[in-house]
Image (tube, helix red, strand yellow):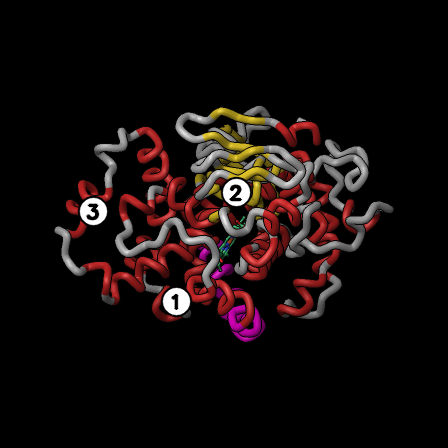
Amino acid sequence: MDTETLQTIVFWTASILYAINGLGIDTFLSEASSVLSQRAVYADMFGFKHTLNNFNHNEIAQVKSRLLGRLIQVQGVNHLPKIFPYLVKRVEQSLDEQVALGKTRPDGISLPVACTVRTITSRVMGVLFFGEKTSSSPILADALLRHSKEMVSCMAAFRITPSFLSSGRFVHGILTSESEYWNGPEHLAQTLLGVWFAAAHQPWMNLDFIILQLCRRPDIQDALREEIDTLEGLTYDKLIELPLLDSFIKETVRLHPLDILAVRRKALQPYTFTSGSPHIPAGATVAVSSYDLMHNSTDYPSSNDFQPRRFIDTESSVRGTKFTEVSEKFPVWGYGSLACPGRFHASIVMKLVIAHIVMRYEMRLEDEKARTFWSWETFIMPYESTRFVVKERTP
Ligand code: HEM
C-alpha cells in the first residue's frame, strides 16, 4: 500500500470502510467532528450493543464519558513513579512463575511467547488497576487474564452471528434476565472492565513482536543490556528516558502495528468533505491507513528496513520523537482528544518487562522457521504456538 490508498474504498462484510489519508487526520477529524463517532466503531467491533445495557454506543464525544480517560491520563500518570516499585516486584514475581512453568531443555527453558507475555502483562497491569493486594488474588488474576481473551472470542463470534440472534434483547435477556443489573455497581464494574480490555489487550501483543525481534537479534539484546547497565538502580524516571529502548520499541511497533488502520470513526449521518470527496454514507467507517503513514519514505527513509536506532539517528522529522508521542506520523495511539490515555502506562509496563527479561536471560527462537503471526481483516495477531528459549545469564 502507499499514500494513494487514500481514496481506497474497501468493501467489508457488512459495512463500508474508507481509508482516508489525503485529507490529513486533523482535517478529517475536525471537519466531520459532528457526525463521526469513535464509540460506535468499538460498539460494532466488540458487540457492546448486544451485551451492554445503558451504553450510548452512538455517542460522539461527550465530556462526561471522557472523564475516565482524562483521569487515567492526568492523575494516573502522576501516580506512576510511586506505583513503580510495586510494578517491578510484580514483573520479577510473574517472570519467575512463567519460567518455572517452561519446559527444561539442555540449552535453556522453552516458553510459549504469547502466553508468557500475555500473563506477565496482565499481572503487572493488575497492580496498576487494582493495587498490589487485591490483584494478587489468584482468582481475580485468572479472571482478568481470561477477560480480554474472551472479549476477542466474543468479537469474532458477533461478527459472524446473524443479527436477529445477537440482538440486544436476546443476548442481554439471557445474561441479565432483563433486571436492573446494569444500573448499579455492576454497571461501574462493566465500565472498568471496558478500560481493562483496552489496557490488557494491546500491550502484550506489542510485547510479543518485540520478544520475537529480540530473539532474532542478539546484538540488540546486548545493546539494551549495555544501556540498562548504565543506570544505577532502576527508577521510573530513568527507565522512561532510555533512548535505545524507546526507539527500539517504537520501531518494532511501527513495522508491526496490530492494525493497519487507525483513528476509526463511524459516520452517524451521511457526510461529504468540503473538497467534494469522498462522500461517506451513514453507517460507514472512516479511518486512516497507519500502514501508509508509517511507511512514508520522507519521514521513514528505507521504510521497510528495521532500524532499532531510527528515532535516535535519523535526519528526518521523526528524530527524537518518543514512543508515547501522539502524531500523524505514528497513529498507533489514535489521534486528537480521543487518543489513548493509557499510553504512558502501556509504555512503562512494556519497558519494565523487556528490561527484566533481557537483564536476566539470553533468548532465541526455539524454531527459527516457526510462523509468528497471522492476519484477520486488518488486524495482525501473534501465533499462540511460537516458542522461545531463555537461558539464565551468568553475572
Ligand atoms: C500498546 C498498548 C495500547 C495501544 C496500542 C492502545 C491504543 C489505543 C487506541 C488506538 C485507542 C483509540 C484512539 C482513537 O480512536 O483515536 C485507545 C483508546 C483507549 N485506550 Fe488505549 N492503547 C494501549 C494501551 C492502553 C492502556 C494500558 C490503557 C489503560 C491504562 C488504555 C486505555 C484506553 C482508553 C480508556 C481508551 C478510550 C479513550 C476514550 O474513549 O476517551 N489503553 N487506545
Asked if residue 99 can be seen in this view, the reply is no
Q: Earlier in the sequence, mark 2 or mark 3?
A: 3
Cα gap from disc 2 to disc 3, whole angstroms: 26 Å
At label 3, the amino acid type is His
Count the marks: 3
Whole-percent x, y for residue 348 in the image: 58, 60
Asked if residue 269 can be seen in this view, the reply is yes
User: What residue did someone put label 1 on?
Assistant: 130
Whole-percent x, y for residue 153 in the image: 34, 38
Q: Earlier in the sequence, mark 1 or mark 2?
A: 1
Q: Nearer the viewer, residue 323 or 53?
A: 53
Q: Is residue 106 above or below residue 367?
A: below
User: What residue did someone put label 3 on?
Assistant: 172
Residue at screen point 66% across, 69% down: 237
Q: Residues within 10 Å of mark 1 (few under 14, many from 20)?
A: few
> Is the stretch drawn in magenta largely helix, strand or loop?
helix
Q: Is residue 167 above or below residue 30?
A: above
Looking at the rendering, the stretch of residues picked out in magenta corresponds to 75-98
